């Protein structure tokens, strides 16, 4: 492996000692070689392993995936992307940067929703409305606000959504820390079962899957770092395009070796949910013919391969427990209003359940503790009272990061 896969930014939520391979599906479209994809999904589900189904401008693999997802208890994911948007110049799936992000998001969303395939359940299948947006930091705030506004529209209409589909090697360092982007990531944090981040990772060569030493395959860690540094839970991550180059892949033996190596890295991050190998689509120098040859060995690897998470060292006998934490960890505490109704309390608990976070009524409990990373999420604090709460925490628990939220309706 070209670099150390173990990383201090791996989520503290990783408790499953037998993680499965997360390069677990194929990129499909209405053309190409997708024969056998339904059986592939069925067989992977049958052994309790998650799959990732993806299709552009059609429902290839998605109807099969949906039928399985309706009855399965396995955490599968599936995405439908539209590549043509009549309101944009040339029908591009890239939004109009000349417009404000709220307007651009609304226009893109309305076109997407109006042409959603009737056979797909938007409560199960994610939509993707954009692809490979501008990489520069100066555009990150606009793109983040666009994603935030799109996320709100998807939630309003009962849809799932993922974006922004950054291309391999992008965005530039610092982009994930832009205000609009952090705003989007916080929204995903509140709705991790309905919103996700979509990325592309390619090595850009068939000779070295670690080409770029983590700046291409493995670049997702910039996103993870930004989340950790800003006390945001890393979002669900979909690699909606994953592979080597746009028209070449290695032979099956080398391809599977690369897939299993990268799988070791991805297994350390619970937020990574799946990757679609590029591609079973038509065109691209007949790439589908070669990619189809990976279906059988990938299925075998998904069924058999497991990755072990590194074990934490046991406590020594002379380490007496005290009021200080046994080890440093990132704590997130959701504070419900004192007068919250049962329904409001349960709504907050449902948000916390996804990441197994703590919920309570005590502001002291939210701030106490000798932890380097503490975040308190305060619900339903009136805007004119928020400064008082910030001053109170600054006085008594100054190391606590404060975020204000409204109780979900």
Image (cartoon, rainbow, N blue to C red):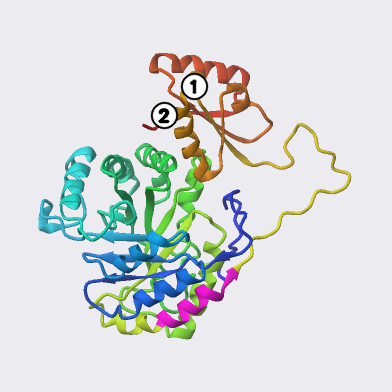
The residue at 48%/73% (across/down) is 259
Residue 291 vertical position relative to residue 405 in the rendered view, above or below: below
The residue at 25%/65% (across/down) is 56
Q: Nearer the viewer, residue 282 or 227?
A: 282
Main SS type for the magenta part? helix
Q: Nearer the viewer, residue 131 or 341?
A: 341
Q: Quadrant of the C terminus?
A: top left
Q: Which residue is mark 1?
A: 337
* Left or right of residue 374: residue 326: right
Q: Which residues are magenta?
A: 294-306
User: Looking at the image, which residue is at 35% across and 61% down?
Assistant: 78
Residue 129 vs residue 263: left or right? left
Quadrant in which the N terminus appears: bottom right
Q: Kindly state the secondary structure of the residue where label 1 is placed.
A: loop
Asked if residue 191 is among those painted magenta in the image, a careful observer would answer: no
* In the image, residue 45 above or below residue 150: below
Q: Position of residue 215 (x, y in %)?
A: 45, 61
The residue carrying pointer 2 sits among few (fewer than 14), some (14 to 19) or many (20 or more) residues within 10 Å by Cα, namely: some
**Residue 52 image position (x, y, % from top left):** 40, 65
Question: Can you tell which mark lies on residue 407?
Answer: 2
Q: Are marks 2 and 1 in contact (CB under 8 Å)?
A: yes
Asked where in the image residue 51 lies, by quadrant, the reply is: bottom left
Q: Secondary structure at mark 2?
A: loop
| Residue 298 located within the stretch drawn in magenta | yes
Q: Earlier in the sequence, mark 2 or mark 1?
A: 1
How far is mark 2 from mark 1, CA to CA? 9 Å
């Amino acid at each position: 492996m070209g670099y150390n896969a173990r990383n201090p930014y791996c989520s503290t939520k990783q408790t499953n000692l037998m993680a499965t391979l997360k390069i677990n599906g194929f990129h499909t479209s209405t053309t190409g070689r997708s024969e056998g994809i339904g059986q592939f999904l069925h067989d992977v589900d049958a052994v309790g392993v998650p799959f990732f189904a993806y299709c552009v401008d059609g429902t290839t693999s998605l109807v099969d995936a949906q039928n399985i997802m309706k009855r399965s208890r396995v955490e599968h994911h599936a995405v439908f992307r539209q590549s043509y948007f009549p309101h944009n110049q040339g029908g591009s799936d890239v939004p109009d940067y000349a417009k404000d992000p709220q307007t651009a998001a609304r226009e893109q969303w309305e076109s997407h929703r109006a042409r959603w395939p009737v056979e797909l359940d938007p409560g199960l299948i994610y939509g993707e409305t954009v692809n490979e947006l501008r990489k520069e930091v100066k555009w990150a705030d606009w793109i983040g606000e666009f994603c935030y506004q799109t996320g709100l529209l998807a939630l309003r209409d009962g849809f799932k959504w993922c974006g922004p589909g950054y291309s391999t090697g992008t965005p530039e360092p610092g982009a994930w820390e832009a205000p609009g982007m952090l705003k989007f990531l916080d929204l995903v944090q509140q709705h991790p079962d309905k919103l996700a981040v979509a990325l592309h990772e390619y090595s850009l060569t068939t000779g070295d899957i670690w080409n770029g030493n983590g700046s291409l395959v493995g670049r997702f860690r910039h996103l993870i770092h930004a989340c950790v540094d800003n006390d945001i839970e890393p979002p669900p991550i979909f690699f909606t395009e994953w592979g080597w180059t746009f028209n070449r892949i290695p032979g099956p033996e080398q391809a599977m070796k690369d897939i299993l190596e990268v799988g070791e890295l991805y297994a350390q991050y619970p937020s990574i949910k799946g990757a679609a190998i590029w591609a079973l689509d038509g065109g691209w120098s007949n790439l589908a013919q070669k990619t189809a040859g990976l279906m059988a060995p990938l299925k075998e690897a998904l069924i058999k391969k497991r990755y072990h998470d590194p074990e934490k060292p046991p406590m020594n006998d002379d380490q007496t427990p005290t009021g200080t934490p046994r080890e440093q960890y990132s704590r997130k505490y959701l504070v419900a209003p004192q007068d919250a109704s049962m329904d409001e309390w349960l709504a907050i608990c449902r948000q916390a359940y996804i990441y197994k976070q703590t919920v309570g009524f005590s502001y002291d409990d939210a701030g106490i503790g000798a932890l380097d990373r503490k975040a308190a999420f305060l619900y339903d604090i009136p805007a004119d009272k928020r400064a008082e709460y910030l001053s109170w925490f600054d006085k008594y628990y100054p190391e606590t990061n404060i975020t204000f939220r409204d109780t979900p309706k």
